[in-house]
Image (cartoon, grey):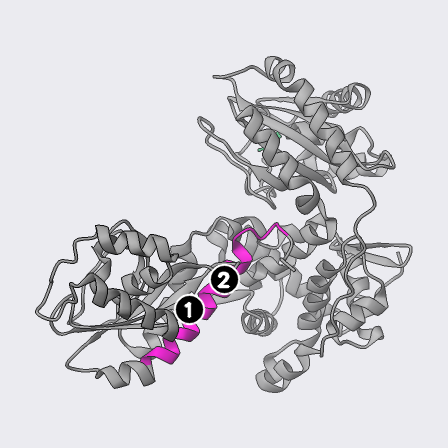
Amino acid sequence: MPPTGSADASVGPLERGLAVLRLVAHAPGGRLRASELARATGLARSTVDRIAATLVRLAYLREEERALVLAPPLMALGAAYLRSSGIPAALGPLAAELAEELDESVSLAVPDGDAVRFVVQNTRRRTLSVSFRVGDALPAERCAPGAIFAADWSAGQWAAWRRRSLADPRDEGFPAVPRPSAPHLPEDGFRALAAAAGERGWAVDDQLVEPGLVAVAVPVLDPGGRVVCALSIVSHTSRHGADRLRELAWDRLQRTAGRMTAALKAPAAGRPAPAAADATADAKRAAGPQYLQSLARGLAVLTALGEGPGGMTLSEVAHATGLARATARRSLLTLQELGYATSDERLFRPLPRVLDLGYAPLSGLALGEIAAPHLAELVRRVNDSASVAVLDGDDIRYVVRVAASRTVRVALAPGTRLPAHATSLGRVLLAALPAAERERWLSGAGLRPLTGLTLTDPAGLAVVLDRVADDGFALVDQELEEGLRSVAVPVRGRGGQVVAAANVSLHAGRTSAEEARTRVLPALRETAARISADLAVVGDSQLPAPD
Ligand code: PHB
């Protein structure tokens, strides 16, 4: 590996920035204070602050009560690996089909150093307490795919495994795995399992992760005969023991692995990435001296690698990021030295280790958790309460609500239901229904009057809903409750479909309808756009971007 000179001032920030992201990603709840980061990294507090300021500016972390918290846009890094590998796109549907046929959990995992990392998960967990997400890692000696990968390990890989296994006997470096209930498998034992897996072409996990969990894995080969990943089926001893599971699933497992090999035929030629301007230059100008441009550039390079399935040349990376070749090259070499990228025959590719940068914890976020920080920001701006809700029968159901700190405010807990027809949230959601469904809703719902102003005529409401659909917002004036005015806009999912609505509720005596439109609505729209952008990365993020 060519020396990259990490002492070089231009690559140091990338290395330290990645270290910070990894520490926050491994911290409980994905949050860590800057002081804790300074302690864990040994860096000066001022250095940590600059790294943090840059990562916050890039929206990869957010600041919350003096802690740094993982933010959904960070998933773009792990998504770059998944897209570049092509595995979820090519093999995900076949894994889903197998899970459906067998009615058991089915996963795909790739080797990641001496660990195993999941890249596809179809979970049908019933009795198990642990459930892995895309991006989670397991020690190789504690799962079926590990024995399959270890069958091909070099002496150097065994040495690395031994070092880690001795240094971390409780698997603390694997936050997703339960602490081991028994001491690690001794090296002889694991070597025997690996050798057997290599000979037979399968491996079982008989409760290595936790009591009750059993799994059978087979290798998935590329057309050249190299092991690309392992296909596992996972069950519980209350249904089948490990050996019985293998007997039951064997034919289908083999057939699916064969179909996967066929699906891995030469990766589709990547579309050339569109040329980009160096976005990090503007940010540097705007953010001033706290901003670490080389960190931002390095992460831009890592993200860009997702655009070239199978690998990208230095020129392609420079083109896609708008960076000079020499700059892109320095970032690529640093990423390579740190184990986040690799290269062969002039092609650079991201490695599974990129998934260690917060992908798994972020992929588990629910709509309410994604929306809450954005609503809090909105409430700080407009000084009134904000919510996100979904349609549930005749009602809307609150998913999350952030109250303004005022003495007089409407108190509503998540889960609260209100009649859809009389609320701005409900009207936005109804306006987004397909025509036939909306018609059915209007004819079935009893449009109860809640104040003297409530619109209760289905035909009149249909006209209002058309307006809402055209305008992209709803303003409801004291139809739910006297003195309450509310404005709402749609929140969209990855494909642009309306998945929820966001609103601000206003005191009618304090905020006129005109002010709701001119002051509150633009801020609300920005908030909804941020929530939608987060949903676009979190939802289905292991799938390739649609054309
Ligand atoms: C899983 O997909 O969760 C899984 C797969 C193989 C194992 C353990 C767990 O050995």
Q: In the displayed structure, does residue 52 sit left or right of residue 158? A: left
Residue in the picture at 54% in, 70% down: 56
Q: Which residue is mark 2?
A: 496
- Classify mark 1: residues with Cα within 10 Å, few (<14), some (14-19) or many (20+): many
* Number of numbered labels in the structure image: 2
Are circles 1 and 2 on residues that touch, CB within 8 Å?
A: no
Give the residues in magenta.
520-543
Residue in the picture at 13% in, 74% down: 483
Q: Is residue 544 shown to the viewer in this render? A: yes
Alpha carbon separation for disc pair 1 and 2: 12 Å
Secondary structure under the numbered disc 2 in the rendered image: loop
Question: In the rendered image, which quarter is residue 192 located in?
Answer: top right
Q: Is residue 190 above or below residue 487?
A: above
First in sequence, mark 1 or 2: give its number: 2
Q: Is residue 304 above or below residue 470?
A: above
Q: Which residue is mark 1?
A: 528
- Residue 206 at x, y = what percent? 60, 20
Between label 1 and label 2, give the one nearer the viewer: 2
Foreground residue among 147 and 275: 275
Q: In the displayed structure, does residue 267 sit left or right of residue 121? A: right
- Residue 167 at x, y = what percent? 67, 39
**Dominant secondary structure (helix, strand or loop) of the stretch shown in magenta:** helix
Which residue extends farthest left?
Answer: 452
Q: Quadrant of ligand 1?
A: top right
Residue 85 included in the magenta stretch of the image: no
Residue type beneath disc 1? Ala
Residue type beneath disc 2? Gly
Foreground residue among 530 and 269: 269
- Residue 383 at x, y = what percent? 28, 77
Q: Is residue 495 above or below residue 264?
A: below
Q: Is residue 186 shown to the viewer in this render? A: no
Question: In the rendered image, which quarter is residue 79 located in?
Answer: bottom right
